[in-house]
Image: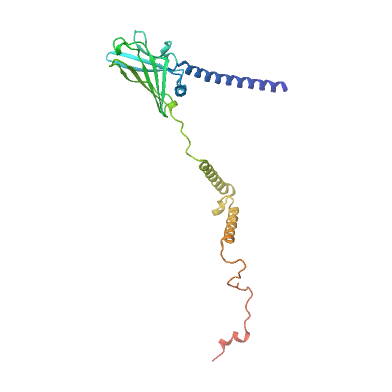
Amino acid sequence: MKMLINRRGGSYLVWTLAVQLVLYGIGAYATDNIKNCKLFSKSETEQKVLSRLEPLTNRNFSAQDADGEDHYTYVFQLCGDAGGVPGAGVVQVKKDQTPKIIGRYNSTQAIGGSDWVMLIYRNGDKYNQHCSGEMRNAFIMISCDRNTEVGELRVAMEDNEKEHDCFYLFELDSSSVCPVIESQLSAGSIILIIAMCLLAVYLIGGFLYQRLIVGAKGMEQFPNHAFWVEVGNLVADGCDFVCRSRSRDEAPAYRGVTAEPLEEDQDERDDHLLPM
């Protein structure tokens, strides 16, 4: 029997350690993916903004777009190889052509607001005929949507009709960038709500017990009816004792009626019956 207990305890300990190691490995893997992004400037502010996007790691997001007869597929990954292309944060894929890198995650910027994050991948492949042959840049606007854990990637626009600073703009909705909603209830409000719930349970449960189990009727269905009646009487007496204005030693202004019958004069009892 002692050996069986040791085996069970050892098995439980092994399973607990295994689960903790798996969870730790998942967290460390996600954190390492965030670290794969190399920021232009090693700013703590940008690093904090980038860490807000950690739930979006380890997955590819794709979007379709068409320009006339040309159809393109765009693939985005956060701090990882988009579409399996090494170093690519966003790639453009056209049928029967080599994928073009729109932006690399080793040239990252992260700008954040209260409910949005703008992720920028720079130093993509150079344009052939547009933007003076500059490198492509990808801007991914990630907006707050509390009803969506992770939405679908959308192509908003490609701005390539100028000589410098051309870019591709993408949009993505996610609840990961939403601000934390702080509770608006104070401690007193929470205590009051709990007290009201307990009171409701007490009244409803007591009423059903008195009604169905005890078989009480009328006011007797109220739980602990006799106790609360006595409490009410005691409270009334206390209020009368504390709040009354007359002196406690003052004699009452009236006299009680005696319970003994009054003696009547026998001679006067029948006077009205005598003839005049």
Name, please, the residue furthest toward the right.
2
Q: Position of residue 225 (x, y in %)?
A: 58, 53
Q: Position of residue 275 (x, y in %)?
A: 55, 91
Quadrant for the N terminus, please. top right
Name, please, the residue furthest toward the bottom.
276
Q: Is residue 200 above or below residue 91?
A: below
Pick whichever, 223 or 125, lies toward us.
125
Count of marks placed on residues: 0
Residue drawn at 31 percent across, 10 percent down: 133
67 vs 61, left or right, is left
220 vs 143, left or right, is right
104 vs 187, left or right, is left
Residue drawn at 60 percent across, 86 percent down: 268
Quadrant for the C terminus, please. bottom right
Pick whichever, 110 or 65, lies toward us.
110
**Which of the 4 image quarters holds residue 270?**
bottom right
**Which of the 4 image quarters holds residue 129?**
top left
Q: Position of residue 59 (x, y in %)?
A: 44, 18
Residue drawn at 44 percent across, 26 percent down: 176
What colour scheme was applied to this rendering of the protein?
rainbow
Q: Is residue 264 above or below residue 185?
A: below
Q: Position of residue 30 (x, y in %)?
A: 50, 19
